[in-house]
Image (cartoon, grey):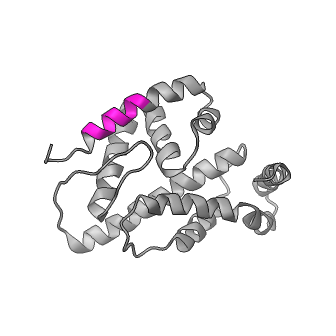
Amino acid sequence: MVECNRAEITRILTQLRDGDEQAAERLLPLVYDRLRDIARRQFRNERRNHTLQPTALVHQAYLEMVGHEALDYQARTHFFATAAKIMRQLLVDHARSKMRRKREGSHRRVPLHDDVLTLERDEDVLRVEDALEKLGAIDPRQASIVELRFFGGLTVEEVAAVLKVSKRTVEAEWTMIRAWLRKELAGDDE
């Protein structure tokens, strides 16, 4: 992203917060490609035959983000971190909706790699969401790190900036989180 776009995005986010009704229209062209990247990253973690498409996910998330007067984005990074969280929640809601219609499921292993969760079924999405809720109850900051790294695609440095902690803290917690998630998502076959 070009440096002038970064400043422009921050300026428009401030205008959006201050009630400028046209700010959302000016913001979208500047952030659309990065939002698409976030959506593609989210879908990289999903099954191949997903019924929701990345473009629809971007548009739903964007409308939700600019439609809430209470949201106050401190900076560009905070905006994109929020986008990742909203997109993940939209995917979880979509999976829950499909599961309500199916009413079946079984426990199985959800593969976890350094920065990729392999989610092949709606049940997998819900297991990851349950694990994140459990982690959030134990340590909310660690749950935020997972959201920002896995689902937001943020670097360790960006996560540290969003959470206002050191890079070293994020790296240490990331190591513990991955071990905890592997155990939590191992399923009945381990």
Q: Give the image quarter of residue 36.
A: bottom right
Is residue 179 rendered magenta in the image? yes
Q: Up-down: is 23 above or below 139?
A: below
Q: Up-down: is 105 above or below 166?
A: below
Specify whether residue 26 is in view. yes
Residue furthest out toward the left:
189
x 13%, y 48%: residue: 189
The x, y position of residue 180, in whole percent, is 31, 34
Is residue 95 rendered magenta in the image? no
The x, y position of residue 179, in whole percent, is 33, 33
- The region drawn magenta spans 175-183
Q: Main secondary structure of the magenta part?
A: helix
Specify whether residue 71 is in view. no
Q: What is the count of numbered marks? A: 0
Along the line of sight, which residue is nearer the eye, 42 or 68? 42
The x, y position of residue 167, in whole percent, is 59, 27
x 41%, y 30%: residue: 175
Q: Does 73 sit left or right of 115 as displayed? A: right
Q: Up-down: is 10 above or below 19?
A: above
x 81%, y 68%: residue: 22
